[in-house]
C-alpha cells in the first residue's frame, strides 16, 4: 500500500547519499594505511614540520646544444623564482660555487694517509733524481718504468669515484656525460602526497615551460618533467582511472550476466537499483565517519557491486520460480521473502563479520576496508528486502512480468547439466575432492614460510599511455646525471652535538651486516663537509709544498706540472670551518626556522636496492631508532620505515585477522542455524573451499602483501554464503533432493559466484599491480568455495544418502526436512 511514497523516499535518500559520497577524497599515500598513532607517522610529521617537504620535481632539458640548454635553464629559473613561496622552497641547477669550493680545498678533503703517501712518493722521486743528476745512481729501468716511479693515478682514481658526476657538469650545470640532457631540480615546501598541490605545481611549471617556447632556443630542444611529484601524480591519476574503469566494467558485466540468466532487462535494472542504493548508503556513511578513501578502499565499489547483488539474485530467483508457477506478484513475494530471508541474512552477516574482523587489526587501511566493506554488504542486504520489493511491486503493477496462461518460450537451468549427471558422477567427484584436499596440505606447508612478498617493485603502479612512457624515459635519463638518491631518509636531532654520534651509530649498525647486505651508502650531515684531522693534514701539505720548491722536478709530466702550479696557488694553511662552506651546501641543512646543522641524511646503497623488502627492513631498522652514547634516543621515519611497518603489520595481523574471521563466521552460523547438521554442512563446505584456495595460491606462488592479504579473511564471509543457501534449500526439500536443489537454488548460487568473480576480475585489469594480485587470490577463493558447495559436497551428500537407510536419520549429517 505504501510503495509509491516509499519509492519517492528511497529515490530522494539515494540522491542525498550520492551527493554526500561525492565529497569523499582519495588519498593515495601509503602512510594513510597506518594508524595515526604509529611512531613512524609521528616522526614523519615531526620531520616535515622542521625540515619541510620531501621529494622533488625535476625539469629535464634535452638538446644537441648545451649552450642553448643553459640559456633556457637560466630563463626558466628566473621565471620560477617569481612563483609564490608556497610553490618552491629551493631550486638546484648550478653547483659551480660548490664545485669551485671543493676544488680549492680538495687537498684538505683527502685522507691523511693518502697525503702522507703522496709526500713519500714525491720525496723518494726527488732524492732519486738528485742522485741520478750527481752520477751516483745507476738505473736499469726503462723510460716507461721511470715515468711510473712517481704516479698519483691510483689516488686520483680513488677521489674521482667520490666526486660522482661533478666532472661532467658544464660550468656547474647538471649535465649528463654526453652533454645532451640537463636537469633543473625543484624542491617544493609541500609533500608529494598532497595531490592537489602536486597537480597545481605540475600544471604551473608546464605552463611556464610552454610560455618560454623551448624550440626557440634550439630546434632539437625537448623539455619534460619527472621526479617524485610527477610520478605520484601519475600514480594518482592512474588510480582514479582504475577506480572508474573497474566500477563501470563490473556494473556492465554483472548486468550482462544477470540479463543472460533472467532474460529480462527489468530484472537487471531492479537489482542494479537495489545494490546501487546499498552502495550509496555505505559510501555516504564512509564520508561521515572517515571522510576519505585510500588505495585499498577506493576499489570497494566493484567488490560491493559484485557481492552485494547476490542477495537480490537469491530473492529474485525464488520470486521468479513462484511467478513462473502461476502465483501472483504479492503471493510470490510473500513466499520468496520468508524462504530466503534467513539464508541471505546469514550470508550477509557472515560476509559483514568477515570484513569487520579487519577492524581488529592495527593497519588503518584494513580497518577502513573492513568498516566500509562490512557495512556495504549488510546495507545491500537491507536494500534487497526494502528497496527491491517496493520497485518490483510498482513495476509489476505497471507492466506484469508474466501474463496469465503465458508460458515461458525458453526454459533453461544453468546447473541442469551437472544436476542431471551428479548421481552418476558422485563417486568420482568425491574421490577428486578428497585428492585435492590431500594435495593442498603439503603445498600450503611448503608455501607458508615464504609466502610474503618482499619485492616491492611488484606493488607499484604500471602507468600506461604516451605521457607516462615519456616520463619513464625522462626519468631514466635524469638518473644518469646524479649519483645516489635524490630523496634520502632524513633524521633531525635536538642539538648539533648529537649529529656525529648519530652517524657513527648508524654506520656501526650497517657494518654489522655482511658486505653484500649492507644497505647504507653514506650518512651525511653539515659537519661531513668539514674535513677531519685538518691540523695534521696542513702540516704534511706544508712539508709537501717545501718539497715542491726543489729544482729537481723535471721528472714531472705535463699534467703533474699543472697540478703542481695549482697546488702552489691554491694551497691554504687555514682550516675549513662550517662558516666557510658555500651556501649551496649549507642550505640543505637549514631547517624552516633557520636552525643549522641538526639535519642528517641517510643515503641507501645501490648495491642493496630498497625495492627488496628485506633490504628495506634493514634500512628502516637502521634509521628507526638510535641510542647515542649519552643515552639519548633519536627516532626517524620516511617511506622505508612506513613500508617496513606495513610489512610487519601483515606479518603480525594477517594470521590473527584470518583466525578472527573464521571464528566469527562459525559463531554467526551457529547462532542463526543452531543445529549441528547445519553447522557441519556449512562450515565444512567453507573449510574445504578455503583449503583448496590455499593449495592453489601455493601452487601458483602468489605472494602475500598488504593489499591482497585482505582477500583471505573476506573469503570466509563470502565463501560461506554458498553453503548456507544450498543447505537451506536442501533442508526444505529433504532427502534425495540434491539434483533438484542444484537446478533451482544452485543456479542462483552459481550466478552469485559469477557476479562476485566479475567484481574481482575487473581488478585484474587495474594498473596497480598489488590490486591485480588481490583480484587473482580472491577469484581463486571464489572458484574453490563455489566448487565445494555445488560439486564436491552435493556429491558427498549423495554418497552418504546411498549408505544410510532412511531409519538412521540421526546419523546423517543432514536433516530430512526443516
Image: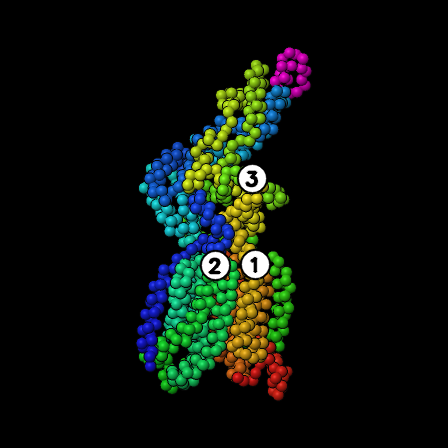
**Residue 398: % across, % down:** 32, 79
- N-terminal label among 2 and 1: 2
In-front residue for pair 653/699:
653
Q: Residue at x 42, y 73 (%)?
A: 382
> Would residue 277 be seen by someone viewing this image from the given angle?
yes
Q: Residue at x 34, y 72 (%)?
A: 10
Please report contact status of discs 2 and 1: CB closer than 8 Å, yes or no: no
Please report contact status of discs 1 and 3: CB closer than 8 Å, yes or no: no
Looking at the image, the residue that sits furthest to the front is 630
CA–CA distance in space, label 2 to label 1 = 15 Å
| Residue highlighted by disc 3 | 501
Looking at the image, the residue that sits furthest to the top is 134
| Residue highlighted by disc 2 | 365
**Residue 39: % across, % down:** 51, 52
- N-terminal label among 2 and 3: 2
Q: Residues within 10 Å of mark 3 (few under 14, many from 20)?
A: some
> Which residues make up the magenta segment?
125-143
Check residue 142 for magenta coloring.
yes
| Residue highlighted by disc 1 | 652
**Residue 327: % across, % down:** 40, 85
Horizontal side of residue 587 vs 7, given as left or right: right
CA–CA distance in space, label 1 to label 3 = 33 Å
Disc 1 is placed on an element classified as: helix
Disc 3 is placed on an element classified as: helix
Amino acid at each position: 500500500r505504501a510503495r509509491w511514497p516509499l519509492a519517492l523516499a528511497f529515490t530522494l535518500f539515494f540522491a542525498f547519499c550520492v551527493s554526500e559520497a561525492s565529497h569523499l577524497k582519495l588519498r593515495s599515500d601509503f602512510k594513510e594505511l597506518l594508524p595515526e598513532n604509529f611512531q613512524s607517522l609521528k616522526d614523519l610529521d615531526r620531520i616535515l614540520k622542521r625540515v619541510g617537504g620531501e621529494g622533488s620535481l625535476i625539469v629535464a632539458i634535452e638538446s644537441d646544444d648545451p649552450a642553448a640548454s643553459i640559456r633556457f635553464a637560466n630563463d626558466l629559473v628566473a621565471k620560477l623564482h617569481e612563483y609564490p613561496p608556497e610553490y618552491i622552497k629551493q631550486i638546484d641547477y648550478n653547483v659551480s660555487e660548490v664545485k669551485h669550493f671543493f676544488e680549492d680545498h680538495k687537498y684538505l678533503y683527502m685522507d691523511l694517509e693518502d697525503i702522507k703517501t703522496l709526500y713519500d712518493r714525491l720525496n723518494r722521486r726527488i732524492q732519486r733524481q738528485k742522485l741520478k743528476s750527481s752520477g751516483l745512481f745507476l738505473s736499469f729501468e726503462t723510460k716507461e718504468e721511470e715515468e711510473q716511479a712517481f704516479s698519483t693515478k691510483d689516488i686520483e682514481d680513488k677521489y674521482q669515484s667520490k666526486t660522482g658526476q661533478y666532472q661532467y657538469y658544464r660550468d656547474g650545470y647538471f649535465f649528463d656525460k654526453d652533454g645532451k640532457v640537463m636537469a633543473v631540480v625543484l624542491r617544493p615546501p609541500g609533500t608529494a602526497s598532497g595531490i592537489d598541490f602536486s597537480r597545481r605545481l605540475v600544471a604551473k611549471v608546464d605552463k611556464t615551460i610552454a610560455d618560454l617556447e623551448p624550440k626557440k632556443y634550439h630546434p632539437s630542444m625537448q623539455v619534460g618533467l619527472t621526479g617524485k611529484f610527477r610520478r605520484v601524480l601519475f600514480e594518482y591519476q592512474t588510480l582514479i582511472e582504475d577506480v572508474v574503469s573497474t566500477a563501470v566494467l563490473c556494473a556492465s558485466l554483472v548486468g550482462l550476466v544477470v540479463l543472460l540468466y533472467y532474460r529480462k532487462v527489468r530484472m537487471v535494472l531492479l537489482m542494479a537499483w537495489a545494490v546501487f542504493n546499498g552502495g550509496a548508503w555505505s559510501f555516504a556513511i564512509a564520508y561521515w565517519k572517515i571522510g576519505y578513501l585510500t588505495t585499498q578502499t577506493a576499489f570497494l565499489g566493484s567488490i560491493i557491486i559484485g557481492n552485494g547483488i547476490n542477495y537480490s539474485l537469491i530473492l529474485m530467483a525464488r520470486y521468479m520460480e513462484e511467478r513462473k508457477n502461476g502465483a501472483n506478484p504479492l503471493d510470490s513475494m510473500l513466499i520468496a521473502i520468508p524462504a530466503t530471508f534467513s539464508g541471505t541474512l546469514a550470508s550477509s552477516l557472515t560476509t559483514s563479520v568477515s570484513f569487520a574482523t579487519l577492524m581488529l587489526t592495527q593497519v588503518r587501511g584494513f580497518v577502513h576496508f573492513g568498516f566500509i566493506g562490512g557495512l556495504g554488504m549488510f546495507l545491500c542486504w537491507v536494500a534487497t528486502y526494502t528497496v527491491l520489493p517496493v520497485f518490483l511491486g510498482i513495476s509489476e503493477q505497471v507492466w506484469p512480468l508474466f501474463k496469465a496462461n503465458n508460458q515461458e518460450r525458453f526454459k533453461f537451468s544453468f546447473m541442469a547439466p551437472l544436476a542431471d549427471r551428479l548421481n552418476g558422477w558422485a563417486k568420482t567427484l568425491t574421490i577428486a575432492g578428497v585428492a585435492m584436499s590431500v594435495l593442498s596440505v603439503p603445498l600450503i606447508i611448503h608455501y607458508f614460510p615464504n609466502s610474503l612478498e618482499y619485492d616491492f617493485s611488484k606493488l607499484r603502479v604500471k602507468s600506461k599511455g604516451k605521457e607516462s612512457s615519456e616520463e619513464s624515459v625522462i626519468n631514466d635519463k635524469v638518473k644518469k646525471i646524479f649519483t645516489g638518491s635524490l630523496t634520502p631518509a632524513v633524521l633531525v636531532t635536538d642539538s648539533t652535538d648529537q649529529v656525529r654520534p648519530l652517524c657513527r651509530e648508524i654506520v656501526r649498525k650497517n657494518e654489522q651486516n655482511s658486505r653484500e647486505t649492507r644497505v647504507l651508502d653514506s650518512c651525511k650531515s653539515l659537519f661531513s663537509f668539514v674535513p677531519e684531522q685538518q691540523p695534521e693534514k696542513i702540516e704534511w701539505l706544508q712539508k709537501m709544498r717545501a718539497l715542491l720548491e726543489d729544482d729537481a722536478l723535471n721528472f714531472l709530466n705535463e699534467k703533474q706540472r699543472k697540478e703542481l702550479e695549482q697546488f702552489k696557488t691554491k694551497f691554504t694553511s687555514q682550516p675549513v670551518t662550517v662558516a666557510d662552506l658555500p651556501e649551496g651546501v649549507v642550505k640543505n641543512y637549514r631547517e624552516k626556522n633557520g636552525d643549522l646543522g641538526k639535519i642528517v641524511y641517510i643515503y641507501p646503497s645501490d648495491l642493496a636496492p630498497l625495492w627488496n623488502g628485506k633490504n628495506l627492513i634493514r634500512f628502516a631498522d637502521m634509521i628507526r631508532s638510535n641510542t647515542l652514547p649519552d643515552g639519548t634516543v633519536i627516532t626517524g621515519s620516511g617511506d622505508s620505515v612506513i613500508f617496513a611497518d606495513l610489512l610487519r603489520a601483515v606479518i603480525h595481523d594477517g594470521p590473527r585477522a584470518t583466525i578472527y574471521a573464521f571464528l566469527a563466521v562459525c559463531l554467526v552460523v551457529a547462532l542463526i542455524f543452531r543445529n549441528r547438521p547445519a553447522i557441519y554442512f556449512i562450515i565444512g563446505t567453507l573449510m574445504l573451499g578455503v583449503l583448496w584456495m590455499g593449495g592453489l595460491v601455493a601452487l601458483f606462488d602468489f605472494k602475500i602483501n598488504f593489499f591482497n592479504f585482505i582477500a583471505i579473511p573476506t573469503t570466509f564471509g563470502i565463501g560461506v554464503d554458498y553453503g548456507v543457501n544450498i543447505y537451506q534449500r536442501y533442508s526444505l526439500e529433504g532427502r534425495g533432493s540434491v539434483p533438484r536443489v542444484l537446478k533451482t537454488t544452485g543456479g542462483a548460487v552459481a550466478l552469485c559466484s559469477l557476479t562476485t568473480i566479475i567484481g574481482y576480475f575487473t581488478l585484474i585489469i587495474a594498473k596497480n599491480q598489488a590490486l591485480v594480485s588481490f583480484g587473482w587470490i580472491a577469484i581463486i577463493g571464489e572458484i574453490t568455495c563455489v566448487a565445494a558447495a555445488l560439486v564436491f559436497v552435493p556429491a558427498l551428500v549423495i554418497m552418504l544418502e546411498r549408505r544410510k537407510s532412511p531409519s538412521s536419520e540421526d546419523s546423517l549429517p543432514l536433516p530430512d526436512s526443516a
